[in-house]
Image (tube, rainbow, N blue to C red):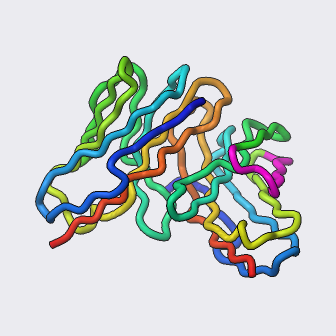
């Protein structure tokens, strides 16, 4: 069964600190992996998307890594800000008409 | 921003009444998805479409039906709403190359 598991489920960090979120998946055959940020009450917004051949991609203070061999991805947030408080969702796409597979997300709270 | 809109944005309805949610896109994307989001569950797939009149069930499809008679519109229908269908519903669109996915702002449905 195609699954995406994220950890931790929730995380609290101090403003200015770094953090890393994890995503493990079993989706096969693999097409791409995306990280989304979802603010409360809003739709998810894309941060990064990576295909099989990419192992690092950055978007400002967000850096995603992908290890397609171990089927693991991470999202590293540098110098966190209060506005980073949100849910971060890992989404994996298989090939063909297979639907997107979502993780349950990591709820990040950045406190002053 | 991608051209995707959901309507209505909020709805309160009574148990047993039919409800239809609309997802409209202006991107001419092939794939469209309906998800529901509940606390502790993340985004769960209800139905998806990979073309006009081509739809398939997701993991939580019971009690829901969909229709896609033209590329730009994907309708989600609750034939007889139940309280367990109280949720936030998100529509997503994905292009032919299965790359970027864009989400609508969500529809908050309350069944009383």
Q: Is residue A21 magenta?
A: no
Residue depicted at x 55% and y 39%: A101
Image coordinates of residue B25 in percent, x first then y, are 67, 53
Q: Quadrant of residue B110?
A: bottom right
- Say which of B74 and A95 sits in front: A95
Look at the image and tell me whether residue A3 can be seen: yes
Q: Which residues are magenta?
A: B59-70
Give the quarter of the image for residue A76.
top left
Relative to A99, A71 lies left or right: left
Residue B90 to residue A31: above or below: below
Residue A71: x and y in percent read 40, 25
Where residue B101 sits in the image (x, y, percent)? 53, 44
**In percent of the image, x 36 and y 62: which residue is there?**
A86
Locate residue B37: give its quadrant.
bottom right
Instruction: Indicate the quadrant containing the C terminus of chain A: top left, top right, bottom left or bottom right.
Output: bottom left
Judging depth in this view, the residue of B80 and A44 nearest the camera is B80
- Say left or right for B67 vs A74: right
């Amino acid at each position: 069964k195609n699954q995406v598991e994220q950890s931790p489920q929730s995380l609290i960090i101090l403003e200015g600190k770094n953090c890393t979120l994890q995503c493990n998946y079993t989706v096969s055959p693999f097409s791409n992996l995306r990280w989304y940020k979802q603010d409360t009450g809003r739709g998810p917004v894309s941060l990064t998307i990576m295909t099989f051949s990419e192992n690092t991609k950055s978007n400002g203070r967000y850096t995603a890594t992908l290890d397609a061999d171990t089927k693991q991805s991470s999202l590293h947030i540098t110098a966190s800000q209060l506005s980073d408080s949100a849910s971060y969702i890992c989404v994996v796409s298989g090939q063909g008409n297979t639907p997107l597979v979502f993780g349950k997300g990591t709820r990040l709270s950045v406190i002053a | 921003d991608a051209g995707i809109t959901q309507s209505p944005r909020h709805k309160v309805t009574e148990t047993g009444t039919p409800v239809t949610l609309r997802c409209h896109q202006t991107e001419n994307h092939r794939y469209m998805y309906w998800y529901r989001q509940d606390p502790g569950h993340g985004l769960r797939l209800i139905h998806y479409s990979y073309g006009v009149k081509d739809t398939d069930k997701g993991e939580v499809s019971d009690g829901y039906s969909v229709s896609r008679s033209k590329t730009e519109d994907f309708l989600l229908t609750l034939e007889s709403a139940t309280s367990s269908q109280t949720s936030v519903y998100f529509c997503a669109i994905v292009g032919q190359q299965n790359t970027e996915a864009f989400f609508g702002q969500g529809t908050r449905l309350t069944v009383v």
